[in-house]
Image (cartoon, rainbow, N blue to C red):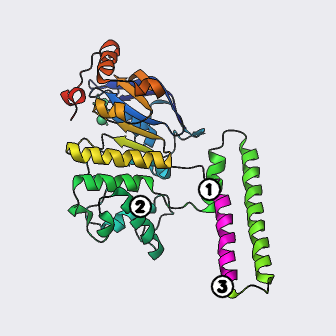
Amino acid sequence: MIELKNISKSFNTGTPNEAKVFDNLNLILNEGDFVTVIGGNGAGKSTLINIISGSISPDEGKVLLNNANITNMKEHQRAPYFGRVFQDPMVGTAADMTVLENLALAYGRGRPRSLFRWSYRKSDIQTFIDDLKTLDLGLEKRLYQKVGLLSGGQRQALTLLMATIRNKPTYARIKKDYVRFSSGDKKAAQNVINQTFIEAKNNFIKTKNIIKANNSLTKEEKKKMHAEAFATYDKTIRAFDVTKPVLLLDEHTAALDPKTAEKVLQITERIVTENNLTTVMITHNMKDAIRYGNRLIMLSQGQIIADVTGEEKQKLTIETLLKLFVTNSKNDILSDSTILGN
Ligand SMILES: Nc1ncnc2c1ncn2[C@@H]1O[C@H](COP(=O)(O)OP(=O)(O)O)[C@@H](O)[C@H]1O
Ligand SMILES: [Mg+2]
């Protein structure tokens, strides 16, 4: 869950160019919400996403992620919890690096700083191939090609993947985040997680010893049972991993031709739904804003002038959306492409 509380933000404060983007903005994004954001030019859509991701800090107010106050957390510290895709396909990927190296770089996000953050284990490659196959663009056959050779659509799809895959966090990290993002008493949470981890480990050791002592088993059988026991242990611990990346998309299909945009949107929807990711998708296209997600927010001059969810959202049409805009907006102008589609 993400909460924006009493957010105010101005640019160029105290100069003739002062622009007050938000004045006491409040917004709650629930876990698993797929929110489309629409609004005129300069309404504050990108600033909203920038404040969530930490690339811009608010002048006033708080940003909470799963109950933790992250307002003062630097952008790179927040990186493990957010995945971003921008409009420009050149931004999200490194052109001079191969598909594999780009994925490895993303996979290393939140890893301790190391000189070779893009280095990968052989065992990671199969994971990357499986991930790439889901895009259905044939990229799994182009692992060793430079990303600069890909089309804009392929690069955006790859960026999406990179924004959502994540290196398996260490047990220590799972523990730390469990406490950081717990809603209640931190001490109680710390006790729960400590206890659970100890029990899981003890169970694993116990099983391991039983297997070891069982002389009727062959070496192969022992190996297999040991692996199963470890998998159970690992699963128990990972069930406490409360961090899933929140996906932030800033007009990520706007630079693509309509057909490619459509394909990237479908990939987006599949990734979001399959992983139940909390997602904010800015779009200039009303049709897409209506078609995708479970919630639609309309921004005008930094204010939320419509917030439509569930069944009501499903029933939206471009006509009703336009009417809402005309009735509630603060004089901003929608671009033709917003009204007419791409
Ligand atoms: N880094 C910045 N410096 C100065 N003004 C900015 C900056 N970022 C955004 N703005 C201003 O804030 C307003 C909202 O911008 P933005 O969030 O990018 O709008 P949108 O994405 O809805 O088009 C605009 O008036 C814009 O000029
Ligand atoms: Mg913008």
Q: Give the residue type that dot 2 points to.
A: Asp
User: In the rendered view, would you say 247 is above or below 120?
Assistant: above
Residue at which label 1 appears: 174
Q: Is residue 28 magenta?
A: no
Q: Where is residue 95 in the image (x, y as percent from the top left)?
A: 25, 61
Q: Distance between the residues labelled 3 and 2?
A: 31 Å
- Is 281 on the left or on the right of 256, as rendered? right
Upstream in sequence: badge 3 or badge 2 = 2
Residue at which label 2 appears: 131
Q: How dense is the environment of label 2, judged by Cα within 10 Å: few (below 14), some, or many (20 and up)?
A: some
Q: How dense is the environment of label 3, judged by Cα within 10 Å: few (below 14), some, or many (20 and up)?
A: few
Upstream in sequence: badge 3 or badge 1 = 1
- Is 227 on the left or on the right of 21, as rendered? right
Identify the magenta region.
221-245
Q: Is residue 242 magenta?
A: yes
Residue at which label 3 appears: 220
Q: Give the residue type that dot 1 points to.
A: Ile
Is residue 232 visible in the rendered structure shown here?
Answer: yes
| Nearer the camera: disc 3 or disc 2 | 3
User: In the rendered view, would you say 126 is above or below 136?
Assistant: below
User: In the rendered view, would you say 138 is above or below 121?
Assistant: above
Q: Position of residue 338 (x, y in %)?
A: 24, 29
Q: Residue 11 carries which label?
A: none
Q: In which quarter of the image is ligand 1?
A: top left
Q: Position of residue 304 (x, y in %)?
A: 41, 22
